[in-house]
Amino acid sequence: MIEPDAVRAALADVHRREWAAVLTATMRVAGSLDLAEECAQEAFVRALETWPRDGLPRNPAAWLTTTAKRRALDAHRRDTTLRGKLPLLFEPDEGTSAAGLLDPAEDTPMNWSHFEPEPSFGGARSIPDDRLRLVFTCCHPALAREAQVALTLRLVCGLSTPDIASAFLVSEATMAARVTRAKKKIAAARIPYRIPALAELPERLDAVLTVLHLVFTTGHLAPSGTELHRPELAERAIDCGRLLLALMPDEREVAGLLALMLLTDARRLSRTDSAGRLVLLAEQDRLRWDAGKIDEGRQLVVRSLRGGRPGRFALQAAIAALHAESPSAASTDWSQIVGLYDLLLQAWPSPVVALNRAVAVAERDGPLAGLAALDELDRRDGTSLSSYHYLPSARAELWRRLGRRDQAAQCYRVALELVDNEAERVFLAERLAEVTGE
Amino acid sequence: MAQYLILIYEDETQYEKGGPELWAEIGQAHARFAQQVGENGAQILGGEALTPTGTATSIRSDVVTDGPFAETKEQLGGFYLIEAKDLDHALTIGKLCPARFGGVEVRPVMDTSGMGE
């Protein structure tokens, strides 16, 4: 007899690491996303019932997969009306008897029978993991970004719909409808369950990385709400990044994204003080940064920068690494950071990048140079940044440093009107009170 | 294989402005498209060009009105019914479809063979 708590903890761990593997293996038998998901969930419920009694199996993931697959086979046997009607998405695995249950020749519009022996990924190297297919299906460009995010969290990370809904501050019903609609489109429009051809890969991979990064930043810095970060979401994004890198070790941008997430996450504990207030990078206690994550992140940065022009995630990670390896805010190598932002602007021309570059210029050349860079940015991209509170926040900070309290206060007020994260709002309000002497 | 409808939405005024040269060009583009569909392993099952929306008549609950069903910036001006392996295949074809004054929408055709059983 094992402590139920210990079993629950072990199971939560297996769920986190193996959910996608159990789900995709079950798909090979289940033939549909919905049935596979249901069976995989049932397997985890069954584990919670039996493991406390029988002890942990030697290979928990294999136990779960076998249980889920058996459920799927049972479901097919029970529902004999499905015979010949339900499309077979996958060839059945060894040791199962799904063959003969269903007629693989039968072609219906709901199926993924275009499942082909996979063209190899990056050369005839290895058999690609089913989890990769799942990731690319979830992030297919025919699905809206918010649907891609929801599906990835649900299917690849195994998060529940209520959890995803609360992370993105929408109602459970809204999120459930979003997931259902996306799954329906996958089936009805026949979005393929496959790794894209080499020619499409850069674009398709970029969508996957964008989705992961969005999940991470939502976890790291909630766009609204009272909590500054939702660690669970950030951790899931990192897990998923690790999985992706293990599956595509040669993709430098995957290494870059994972590095960026690790280096950013390393600062998580010091981003807020004990009262939950925001602490700026310069004022953070660097001893509280996670040295293990920084180390891993730095090694990945090196890997992501090597061989050819670096991508946008690699460059952002390199900037994060420069911050991370600097023993104090004062000793930060701002010249190199400005240089990296210049490269990043070329790889990814975005006003947000230009804004960050201007802030780095201010650190290197002083507040006036920073303000000039911000003015230039405002002239060029003012409209697209008009609802972005970091622009007036950055201006306010630079005016404050110059001792120009009136201008600073004015900019803090503009920023306060735009900010929607509670921790950031409190921070800006305190700074405003400081410069107005109230 | 599955069927998809490629709906061509374009600013039809551009066609009114264009002369016979434009029509010849568009005709050639569509002929080339038909050839490319085959080369890409898909098949055209049907397709037509439509006369401008000025000729459209709409009916709602038996009430007949002059004009298209909805006023939009780009109008449905033609379509192809194709057969393709999956959505990626259909999108590859959709990208080849001429629509210089607008774009195309790719819609899976509903399979109704199993309905009503």
Image: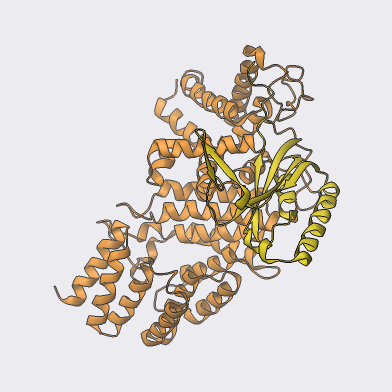
Chain colours: A orange, B yellow
Q: Tell me where residue A16 appears, x and y as whole percent.
A: 51, 39
Residue at image point 42% right, 74% down: A382
In this rendering, position of residue B89 left or right of residue A270:
right
Q: Is residue A254 visible?
A: yes
Residue A12, image x, y percentages: 47, 34
The vertical placement of A331 against A80, above or below, is: below
Q: Quadrant of residue A107?
A: top right
- Position of A285 relative to A167 (above/below): below
Is A288 situated left or right of A135 in this image? left
List x then y, in percent, for residue A143.
Answer: 58, 46
Quarter of the image with the C terminus of chain B is top right
Residues A327 and A27: in front is A27
Residue A58 appears in the picture as rendered: no
Residue at the spot 44% in from the left edge and 58% down from the top edge:
A290
Tell me where residue A417 sits by quadrant. Answer: bottom left
Horizontal and vertical percent for residue A22?
A: 60, 32
Q: Image height check: is A345 above or below B20? A: below
- Left or right: where B69 falls relative to A366: right
The residue most toward the left is A438
Residue A282 or A91: which is nearer the viewer? A91
